Amino acid sequence: MSNHTMKGTLFGGFKRSDVTEYIERLSKENMEALTLLREEVENLRSERDQLSTEKESLVETNALLEAAKEEKAALTEEVVALRADKLAAEKELAAMREELEQLRPEVQEYHDIKAKLSDLQIEACRRANELEENTKARMQALEDETYERLQKLASGCRSAYDATFVEHYPAVFDEIDELLKREEVVEPHAEGAEEASVTYLF
């Protein structure tokens, strides 16, 4: 509001036109001031709403930050545990490598022995096959020799049989008939006496 003063007349009164003009000017200034206040109120309301929205966003952000802090703490604990596991695994790996280095000569010796055993096995198989072939050949030769001897023996037996039973067949059976006739004429002994011994020629 402007600080205008009303001019007095020479006799201490006020001019009507000045009063009217002052009132109009004062009313206009009040309207302008009211408009400015309303605009300021609207601006303040808008700013308040914006601040309220920002506050809600900040609250949500703060909640997210708290959750993130909790998750970070949990992840930190997990990382610590994983580092401890990693350290234990590294120690175990180092111990296993040391043990492996100690066992390496034995492993190499085992492989060398295995290679020698493989060579011996191959040689033994070769010798076994060779022995089997030689044995088969010797058995075949022995079988052939035995068969040939049996053939000769059978031939000799057949010749002996022919010479004994075929050539002398009538004489042998004549002698048998003669012996049978002699047995028929022998009288039996008395009771209690020993039986007579009979000598057979065949």
Image (tube, grey):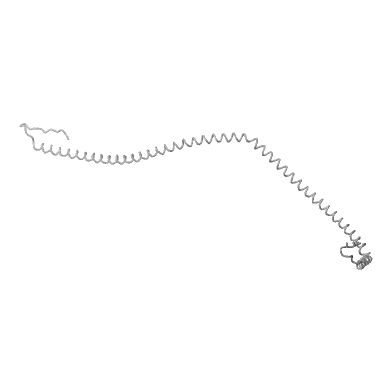
Classify residue 106 as left or right of residue 186.
left
Q: How many marks?
A: 0
- Please provide percent x and percent y for residue 82: 48, 37
Residue 180, quarter of picture = bottom right
Q: Nearer the viewer, residue 1 or 68?
A: 68
- Please provide percent x and percent y for residue 121: 72, 44
Classify residue 33 as left or right of residue 154.
left
Q: Quadrant of the N terminus?
A: top left
Q: Nearer the viewer, residue 68 or 106?
A: 106
Q: Nearer the viewer, residue 201 or 25?
A: 201
Q: Nearer the viewer, residue 113 or 156?
A: 156
Is the residue 38 above or below the residue 171 in the image? above
Is the residue 189 above or below the residue 24 in the image? below
- Please provide percent x and percent y for residue 34: 19, 39
Classify residue 54 as left or right of residue 6.
right
Q: Quadrant of the C terminus?
A: bottom right
Residue 73, quarter of picture = top left
Classify residue 25 as left or right of residue 80.
left
- Please provide percent x and percent y for residue 148: 86, 56
